[in-house]
Image: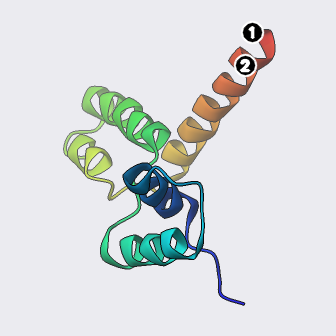
């Protein structure tokens, strides 16, 4: 039994073929995953920008590093993305 391709690649293959699965779609999804980078989480992009704005106010030279993704493992960014995810959960619970 083969390993399933990543979800993002399956979605892209399904979108291209207007298909809901099958061996050909899975094979194409594996091809996509092997030749393309996974999309960046939109919340990660937002967290980078929040941290970059904070860095512009307080620490010169670090803002562009946040925006470029070179600070993704810094605790401040990790806490920011966790806060964004929690905010979404709270918003969904209240809806």
Q: Using the image, determine if residue 93 lies above or below residue 17.
A: above
Quick one: 70 or 86, which is closer to the camera?
86
Per the image, the residue denoted by label 1 is: 95
Q: Residue furthest right?
A: 93
| Residue shown at the point (60%, 62%) measured from the top left | 21
Q: Is residue 4 left or right of residue 72?
A: right
Farthest residue, direction top: 95
Q: Gap in Å between the C-alphas at discs 2 and 1? A: 5 Å
Foreground: 91 or 19?
19
Q: Is residue 40 visible?
A: no
Q: How many marks?
A: 2
Coordinates of residue 60 in the picture (x, y in percent): 21, 39
Q: Give the quarter of the image for residue 64.
A: top left
Foreground residue, 55 or 4? Answer: 4
- The dot on residue 34 is none
| Residue 25 visible (yes or no) | yes
In this view, 29 is above or below 47:
below
Circle 2: is it few (<14), some (14-19), or many (20+) Cα within 10 Å?
few
Do tag 2 and tag 1 residues touch (Cβ < 8 Å)? Answer: yes
Classify mark 1: residues with Cα within 10 Å, few (<14), some (14-19) or many (20+). few
Q: Secondary structure at mark 1?
A: loop
Q: Residue at x 78, y 10 (%)?
A: 94
Which colour assignment does the render follow? rainbow
Kindly indicate the quadrant of the structure image that contains residue 1: bottom right
Residue located farthest toward the bottom when viewing the structure as drawn? 1
Q: Give the quarter of the figure containing the C terminus.
A: top right
x and y, in percent, of residue 52 in the image: 32, 36
| Side of 60 where 17 appears, left or right | right
| Position in image of residue 49 (x %, y %) | 34, 34
Identify the image quadrant of residue 63: top left
Residue 92 is tagged as 2
């Amino acid at each position: 039994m083969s390993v399933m391709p990543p979800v993002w690649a399956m979605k892209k293959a399904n979108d291209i073929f207007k298909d809901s699965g099958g061996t050909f779609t899975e094979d194409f999804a594996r091809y996509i995953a092997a030749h393309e980078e996974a999309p960046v989480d939109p919340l990660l992009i937002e967290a980078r920008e929040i941290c970059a704005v904070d860095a512009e106010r307080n620490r010169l030279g670090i803002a562009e590093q946040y925006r470029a993704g070179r600070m993704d493992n810094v605790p401040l960014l990790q806490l920011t993305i966790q806060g964004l995810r929690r905010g979404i959960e709270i918003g969904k619970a209240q809806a």
